[in-house]
Image (spheres, grey):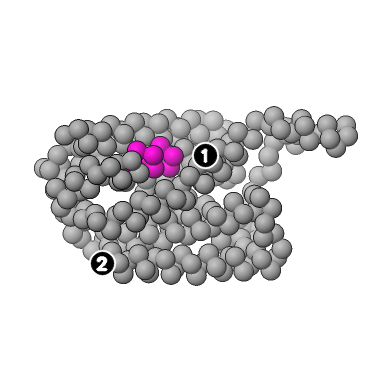
């Protein structure tokens, strides 16, 4: 390798047989990319509000459509998934939960937890 | 080189700043996101007046002012790692800088919007 101090790069996606650990890791990155887009939409929403009520009617028309409900469901799940799995990553950074049994247990907890929190949030919101 | 010296020399690795900021923003975002979601119970995005009033309240306004810059920093750091891992080295610096500039521009636009809603 040309740079001996370069950080190790993630393995290529195709060489691994999918398993809980790799799928959750890839999902963390995909939800991260998606949430970057969501943050951009949040900014557009704020700028839209700042432009006044006439400009905002465009957003209201979108908000009343079924697509926004579908999208919001996805956003809520991605937020909880990335947040809970992020806490799992932070625990690893401090050296906790590294045994294979723990990695699987916390992985399933993240899946169950994000589904449960999404359901609770959507029931309260709708 | 003995292990102790090797360890000391690793502490000035250029990737360390990135790693620390990624974790610091992550730790900040956990309570920030939960707090913002909790306050969103009283938000009705379908009504312009209600949305304005919601943002003008102290809690949501403070949350948004902190949430957006921290989110964009966390997002730019995360996207940088994904770009480095999966895209050709020839596009790294160009794309990473494009992400950074977009993050800064969107942060400024968001803060401008929040302040103009607050002062209106």
Q: Which residues are magenta?
A: B64-71
> Residue A101 occupies which quadrant of the picture?
bottom right
Host chain of mark 1 = B
Going by the image, does A53 lie left or right of B91?
left
Going by the image, does B83 lie left or right of A2?
left
Q: Which mark is residue B77?
A: 1
Whether B1 is drawn above or below A65: the answer is above
Residue B62 screen position, x and y as percent = 33, 41
Residue B76 screen position, x and y as percent = 48, 38
Please tell me which residue is depicted at 18% across the width and 59% down the height of the picture. A64
Q: CA distance from mark 1 to mark 2?
A: 34 Å
Which image quadrant: the C terminus of chain B? Answer: top left
Which image quadrant: the N terminus of chain B? Answer: top right
Please give the residue where the numbered disc 2 appears in the rendered image.
Answer: A126
Please tell me which residue is depicted at 35% across the width and 64% down the height of the picture. A121
Are circles 1 and 2 on residues that touch, CB within 8 Å? no
Q: Is residue A18 visible?
A: no
């Amino acid at each position: 390798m040309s740079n001996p101090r370069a950080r190790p790069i993630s393995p290529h996606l195709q060489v691994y047989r999918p398993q809980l650990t790799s799928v959750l890791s890839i999902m963390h990155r995909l939800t991260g990319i998606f949430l970057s887009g969501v943050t951009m939409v949040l900014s557009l929403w704020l700028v839209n509000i700042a432009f006044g009520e006439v400009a905002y009617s465009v957003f209201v028309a979108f908000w009343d459509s079924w697509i926004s409900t579908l999208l919001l469901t996805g956003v809520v799940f991605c937020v909880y998934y990335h947040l809970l799995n992020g806490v799992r990553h932070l625990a690893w950074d401090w050296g906790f939960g590294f045994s294979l049994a723990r990695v699987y247990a916390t992985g399933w907890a993240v899946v169950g937890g994000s589904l449960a929190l999404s359901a609770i949030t959507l029931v309260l919101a709708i | 080189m003995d292990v102790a010296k090797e360890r000391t020399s690793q502490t000035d690795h250029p990737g360390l700043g990135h790693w620390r900021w990624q974790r610091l923003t992550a730790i900040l975002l956990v309570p920030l996101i939960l707090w913002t979601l909790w306050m969103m119970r009283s938000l009705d995005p379908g009504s312009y007046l209600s949305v304005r009033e919601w943002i003008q309240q102290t809690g949501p306004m403070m949350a948004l002012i902190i949430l957006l810059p921290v989110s964009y920093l966390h997002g730019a750091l995360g996207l940088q790692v994904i770009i480095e891992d999966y895209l050709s080295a020839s596009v790294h610096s160009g794309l990473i800088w494009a992400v950074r500039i977009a993050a800064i521009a969107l942060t400024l636009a968001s803060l401008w919007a929040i302040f103009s809603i607050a002062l209106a």
